[in-house]
Image: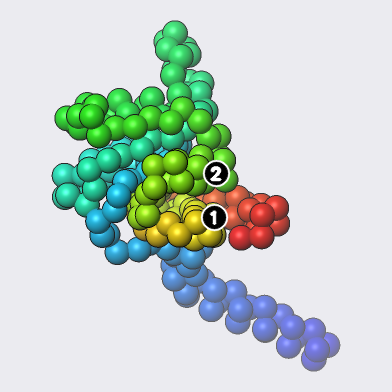
Amino acid sequence: MRRFLIIVFSLLLLAAITYTYREPILRWFATSLMVEDPLQKADAMVVLSGGGYDRGNEAVKILRAGYTNKVICTGGNPVIELRVFGIDTLESDMTVANLKRQGIPDSIIIELKDGTSTKEESDIIAQYCKQHQLKKIMIVSSKLHTYRVQSVFKNKLKKQGVEVIVHGAPSSRFNELKWWQDEDGLIAVNNEWIKRFYYWWKYGF
């Protein structure tokens, strides 16, 4: 009986501590996914697919601040929802359209209509850097993706002498540090942790 009471008390104590510190604990699940480098000048900026609005908006700010004069947009996945309106377009097209909408000239935009995952995009960008002798690039993705982006790109491009700067675009749908308050945040954090474990299991990072 005494042992049972000790177990019950311990569980209640653990539950009380968890509840008291629930916000820092929940915040950790997001901050552990976010790893960024200080902004600095680069030969080119790469805007990864999957978030043409938020990532495109952040790319415009970076271009206007003068950190680079070339932006590469990747992404070979189709935007399925737009087919409802008879529009056949790719994720890279969406990013490019957002840049042009905000006055970024065609002359500094390069569109690579390939890459259906972060791993594929890293292969494409590694090849592009080799062909065009780029030595320092900035990768822009969503804030919650930056840990995985950094792991994938820095591992690959370090081997060919390319320095990688990782920068995260904030979400317009939810606050990353209070992700549990919005359904979009719940989905985003859940999906990114699954992808993080998948990349660790399949690729080792």
Q: Is residue 26 left or right of residue 6?
A: left
Residue found farthest to the right: 1
* Residue type at tag 1: Lys
* Residue that appears at 24% across and 48% down: 68
Q: Is residue 25 left or right of residue 73?
A: right
Can residue 176 be seen here? no
* Residue type at tag 2: Asp
* Residue that appears at 60% across and 50% down: 195
Tell me if label 2 and label 1 are in contact, CB under 8 Å. yes
Q: Which mark is residue 123?
A: 2
Q: Nearer the viewer, residue 61 or 24?
A: 61
* Residue that appears at 49% across and 65% down: 32
Q: Secondary structure at mark 1?
A: helix
Reading the image, the residue beneath label 1 is 156
Circle 2 residues within 10 Å: few <14, some 14–19, many ≥20: some
Q: Distance of mark 2 from mark 1, alpha carbons?
A: 8 Å
* Residue that appears at 54% across and 51% down: 192
Quarter of the image containing the N terminus? bottom right
List x then y, in percent, for residue 187: 52, 45
List x then y, in percent, for residue 139: 39, 50
In this picture, is 26 found above or below 194?
below
